[in-house]
Amino acid sequence: MQENVSFFLNNIKENSNLNAFNFVFDDCIEQTSSIEQKIKNGSAGKLAGMVIAVKDVLAINQKPLTCSSNILRDFISIYTATAIQKLIDEDAIIIGKTNCDEFAMGSSNENSAFGTVLNPVDTSRVPGGSSGGSAAAVAADLCDASIGTDTGGSIRQPAAFCGIYGLKPTYGRVSRYGLTAFASSFDTVGPFARNVDDIALVLSVISGYDENDSTSFKTDVPNFVTNLHSRKKLRIGLPKEYFAEGLNEEIRNAIFEKVEFLKEQGFEIYEIELPHTEYSIATYYILTTAEASSNLARFDGVRYGFRSKEDNNLLNMYVNSRSEGFGSEVKRRIMLGTYVLSSGYYDAYYRKAQKVRRLLKQDFDKAFEKVDLILTPTTPTTAFKIGEKTSDPLEMYLGDIYTTSANLAGIPGINIPIGKDMQGLPIGMQVMSRQFDELSLLQFSQIFDR
Ligand code: GLN
């Protein structure tokens, strides 16, 4: 176990150019002897010795919690997020906090006060975002598994760009207590790993009701691990809106190759419709910026982290602390969100977007009457070059076209790595299921994991 931890600690140092970690906990190696002792006397937890990296938006007691933002640069957490406490209670070893887009806002990990993360597959390219550090850390073998968060694709998209598995659970499956809120009605916490077994294992540990999160659900957590290998003949739906113009040809071909394989395996494949898909990006960016503008109001220079030196009066202190502390993407979203919530625009944008959210959810409800799983690309392109989209925020947002719907509907989704394009860049396939049916996603993914 000690060799395993020191292997990862060395690998992190050797790959420091990737910039995957904001903080590395070198002293975590000291935990190995007590965990080994527990293994000897039969009291070790389910994750005994598993080395896990945690996105730097989740709280760990007495450790830095920066959200990759200058406004929280020196902030130390005074409690531990429920999902992370559950890992610790099962004897996982937390090796560090991973880099991400500031407050989880982004698709490329270029919006970080700690600098860009490089994609380990091709270091001239982005790892995806916002959980770019968590994805890169797993892809580069810097840990056994990692934890990310997904508000509009931030687990599935970086998993696709880095060629690994990443699962976004149902909204409410995993407690958000101790997760710094971006958009509270969208945010989810989930695992990255190099194989489905590890995804199932970590998910089974972090799932479950938490009295500290009123939006976590009181429902049984199936045993994802022991039920993983049972094979059900699931009905698969291909939504035609997800294969329309704009999808890279190599990705399309790779997915249809898998569809042929599934047919040979006896799966029933149906073409389905999700007719409101074209509104998902607009709806997502109205509602999440609205929620973000409200959630980020707490960073005012008084209660957390950074305070501007230019504070000759109270208002200046607020204004300057926020102006100096937040990066430009975060400011853009706070302004957008404030705008869509302001009087006169609330009905035109915010309320309308809430209604469209319901329509998008109904699309899925209808589709799931006919099929058990929905299969789509995860991203319209493979990993793009660093800097390619930074000057055009709208272009960046459009890359989230296939992932935001699952968050709008609250359903789970997984990225399955299914191959590489001609440049050697990973291609991802997304599978979505009914609320709380992560088990079907895992059982299905298992078919591709060899
Ligand atoms: N890329 C999306 C955004 O920028 C998703 C972010 C996320 O899931 N945290 O908002």
Image (cartoon, rainbow, N blue to C red):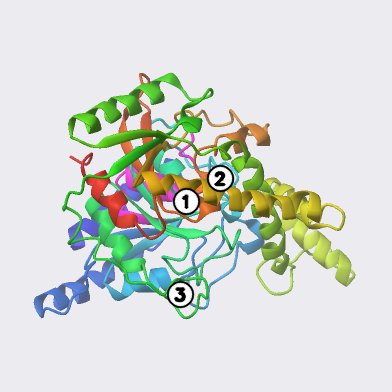
Question: Who comes first in sequence, dot 1 or dot 3?
Answer: 3
What is the quadrant of the N terminus in the image?
bottom left
What is the quadrant of the C terminus in the image?
top left
Residue 298 % position (x, y): 70, 69
Determine if the magenta segment contains residue 137: yes
Instruction: From the viewer's side, name the closer residue of 308 and 379.
Output: 379
Instruction: From the viewer's side, name the closer residue of 95 and 209.
Output: 209
Count the numbered circles shown. Answer: 3
Specify whether 50 is left or right of 217.
Answer: left
Q: Residue at x 47, y 81 (%)?
A: 211
Q: Which mark, by number, is residue 365?
A: 1
Q: Secondary structure at mark 3?
A: loop
In space, the residues marked 1 and 3 are separated at their CA atoms by 36 Å
Question: Who comes first in sequence, dot 2 or dot 1?
Answer: 2
Asked whether residue 201 is in view, the answer is: yes
The residue at which mark 2 appears reads as 115
Disc 2 marks which amino acid? Answer: Gly
Asked whether residue 152 is in view, the answer is: no
Disc 3 marks which amino acid? Answer: Thr
The residue at which mark 3 appears reads as 80
In space, the residues marked 3 and 2 are separated at their CA atoms by 25 Å
In space, the residues marked 2 and 1 are separated at their CA atoms by 41 Å
Q: Residue at x 61, y 51 (%)?
A: 357
Question: Who comes first in sequence, dot 3 or dot 2?
Answer: 3
Quarter occupied by residue 147? bottom left
Badge 2 vs badge 1, beta-carbon distance below 8 Å:
no
